[in-house]
Each structure stands twice: as C-alpha cells, then as structure tokens.
Image (cartoon, helix red, strand yellow):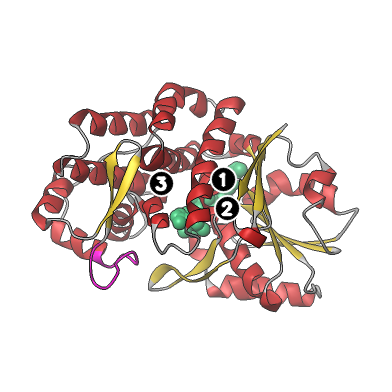
Amino acid sequence: MHETLTVELGSRTYPIYIGNDTFSHENFLTQHIKGKQVFIVSNATVAKLYMPALLKVLNTVYQADTYLIPDGEQYKTLETYSRVIDELMRKRHNRSTTLIALGGGVIGDITGFVAATYQRGVGFLQIPTTLLAQVDSSVGGKTGVNHPDGKNMIGAFYQPSSVFIDVDALRSLPEREFSAGLAEVVKYGVIWDAGFFSWLEGNMQALLAKDRSALVTAIKMSCKIKALIVSEDEREEGVRAILNFGHTFGHALERMTRYTQFLHGEAVSIGMVMAADLSRRLGWLSCDDVSRLENLLEAGGLPTKFGQPINTTEMLSSMGMDKKVVDGKLRLVLAKTLGSAQIVESVDSQMLRDALISNV
Ligand code: NAD
Ligand code: GLY
C-alpha cells in the first residue's frame, strides 16, 4: 500500500509515493522510467541492504548499471561528481537514461546534480533511505556538492520525476541518524501546522518504535508541507526560507564544532530551541510553547542545549557567514506561534546574544 502526494510544479509536477513495498512492485517503479538505461548511485552501506532487491526489479527490463561512492559527507565533492560522470560516459549512457539515487541526502544531492548536468539534464528518481532524506532532501529539487570553503556551494535546482519512500528502510538506520531526521519532522510542525505538532507529541514513541502507520503519517505530513511550500516558491525567493527554521543557528554550531560533534539534525534541534527562545523574547511564543518544543525534541532523542560555554561573538560571526544572509543583513526564521513562522530581517543583537547564552 502506498500513499501518494503531488509536488505541483506545472510541467515538472511529480508524485511522492510513501509506503513499505517499493521494491516488490515492478510496474510501480518502471512506469517512471522512460528510456532503456538506468544508472543507480548508492554507497556500500545502503547498497548491501537494498541494491539486490532494486536490481531484481530493474535488471530484466533495463541496462541497469550501478555506481557506489564512498560513504560520508566528505565525499560530497566535485571530484565524486566527476567520477560519476566518468562512469556514465564509460557505460555509454545516453540522453534518455534515468539516474536513481538510492541512499541518504548525500547520495541524493550528488546524484541530482549529476542528473541536472549530464548531457544538460537526464531522468532522475529518488529512493531516499534516511529519515532526513525522506522528509526533506529528496523533495524540492535542491541538488549539489560542497566546496572546500562551504557546504552546498555548487549546485542546481533540479526536480526528480518521482520520489519513492519505503518506511521499512528506516529499520536499518542507526538510531542517532533516525533522531536527526526527526528534528526536520518537528520543524514542519513548528513552522506550519500546530495540529501536526500536537500529533507528534502523542506519537513520538510510536515513531521511535518504527511503527509503520505512524511513520507513514509523519512522513506524509512532512512531505505535504514541504511540497506546498516548494510549489509556492521553488527557488527560495520568499516563503521557502521558512524551511530553514533553526538552521542558521544550527549551521553555526556545526561550523564552530568543525562538523565533528553534531549530526546536522542534532545541531538544528539545538538551533530550533535557540530560535524559539528568541521568538519568546519577542513576545511571540510563550514559555510553555518553548518547553513543549524542548520536550518533544528530547523525547525524539535529540539534544536541545549546546552543552558547553558559548563564545557569542564567534557564534554571531559564524551565523553571519551563513548563505541565508542577504545583502549583509542577518535574516532569521522565527516562530510567530507554534504552527507558523516568520522571516525577520533585523533582530536586536542583545536579545539574540541572550537567546544564545541561555541555551548553552
Ligand atoms: P547521509 O546521506 O550521510 O546518510 C547518513 C548515514 O546513513 C550514511 O552513513 C548512510 O550510508 C547511512 N544510511 C542511509 N540509509 C540507510 C539505511 N536505510 N540503513 C542504514 N544506513 C543507512 O546523511 P543524511 O542525513 O541522509 O543527508 C545529509 C545530507 O543531505 C547533507 O549533505 C545535507 O546537505 C543534505 N541535505 C540536502 C537537502 C536538500 O534539500 N537537497 C536538505 C537537507 C539536507
Ligand atoms: N532543506 C531546505 C529546503 O529544501 O529548502
């Protein structure tokens, strides 16, 4: 059984399928493949779990080639991108080939960027296997690789032609990675849907237990909200920026700890609490709202405090380096209520410092 959502983008509209039997329905996957060639990009960790089933479906119908890249964010580079292109050339993939990303956000981002640029754009399907990829990176068309001086600095907007989400793939995901994905799920409740936030409060244990029906609901709600926002503002010229709630703080925390201490979702979790605290100082959220957010994140196995003294000057300068800075102004996404967000162009710097210091 699959639930289907649609990302409405005119001629580039595409479906997101959410269920638990992605690999066993041949037609289901193949109806979205136009040519005779497919090229599956993955890594060894994911491939050993899910590639055999995928190849079983695809091998008989297509020239199905695979390419494994090393596992890790440090390989999300132009060099890896270039190796994938080399392999496509070597295996003579033509303009009607379809690239399939099988893995987490790293695989999805690189594969999407290759798909956007190989022969000026070829078919692209996403099979996300981390919670973060299922609720965030596989939807919305941001693709790319890192530059040594900054994350995601090279890339393109390139939408997939469909996204296949198999919730059972989350059973093999390490707990810490699963919780990191939950941070993005909670984010959707805060920025868009108070009812979903309350639902998460009542269902966090079911999600941690990988209850299928709870997972389908949480992923469907998350993708629905992301799809709505992306349909309205594909290129992040306006409302899409609210998807960065907690991220300007989180990115700064990741940078300050040299990307060694926190997974992205963990840093975003602490960042969301900082953003919520700032929202409270502006009179938007109540103390009770901020506590509810902290409790929900903690129930999801996430950190809510930095856990060490914070150098606010370093943190503010690190936040200023974030690429969400427009024309030198620090734009922050804050919560107007639990369930709605607002982009704020200028924030009192003492208030911001106070919000940082009180959340270490
Ligand atoms: P990841 O891709 O590194 O995956 C995390 C780990 O889980 C890896 O070791 C991976 O091999 C492993 N893994 C994946 N699926 C598994 C499974 N089912 N079972 C067991 N292990 C599994 O990390 P991520 O958190 O998925 O993605 C992070 C990346 O996503 C970052 O590069 C970030 O910039 C990007 N991102 C992109 C967008 C976007 O809109 N394009 C949004 C958010 C994040
Ligand atoms: N991850 C934020 C976005 O896709 O816009």
Q: Position of residue 34 (x, y in %)?
A: 81, 61
Lower position in the chain sequence, tag 3 or tag 2? 2
Left or right placement of residue 26 versus residue 259 in this view: right
Q: In this view, does 330 lie to the left or right of 239?
A: left
Q: How far apart are marks 2 and 1 (CA)?
A: 6 Å
- Give the camera-side residue of 317 and 187: 187
Dot 2 corresponds to which residue?
Answer: 138
Q: Nearer the viewer, mark 1 or mark 3?
A: 1
Q: Is residue 47 toward the left or the right of residue 269 in the image?
A: right
Instruction: Please state which amino acid type lies under the numbered disc 1.
Output: Gln
Provide residue 153's location: percent of width, then percent of height.
44, 71
Beta carbon of the mark 2 residue lies under 8 A of ligand 1: yes
Quarter of the figure that contains the C terminus? top left
> Is there a contact, CB below 8 Å, between mark 2 and mark 1?
yes
For numbered disc 3, what is the local secondary structure?
helix
Q: Does the magenta stretch include residue 324?
A: yes
In the rendered structure, find residue 265 and report the number of the disc placed on it.
3
Give the mark nearest the N terminus, 1 or 3. Answer: 1
Disc 3 residue crowd, few under 14, some 14–19, many 20+, Cα 10 Å: many
Kind of residue at badge 3: Gly
Q: How crowded is mark 1: few (under 14 residues within 10 Å), some or many (20 or more)?
A: many
Residue depth check, mark 3 versus mark 2: number of the one nearer the observer: 2
CB under 8 Å between discs 1 and 3: no
Q: Please tell me whether residue 324 is drawn above or below residue 54 in the rendered image.
A: below
Q: Could you tell me residue 311's position as x and y percent?
A: 15, 56
What residue is shown with label 1? 134
**What residue is shown at x 74% (from left), y 36% (from top)?**
21
Q: In this view, does 51 lie to the left or right of 126?
A: right
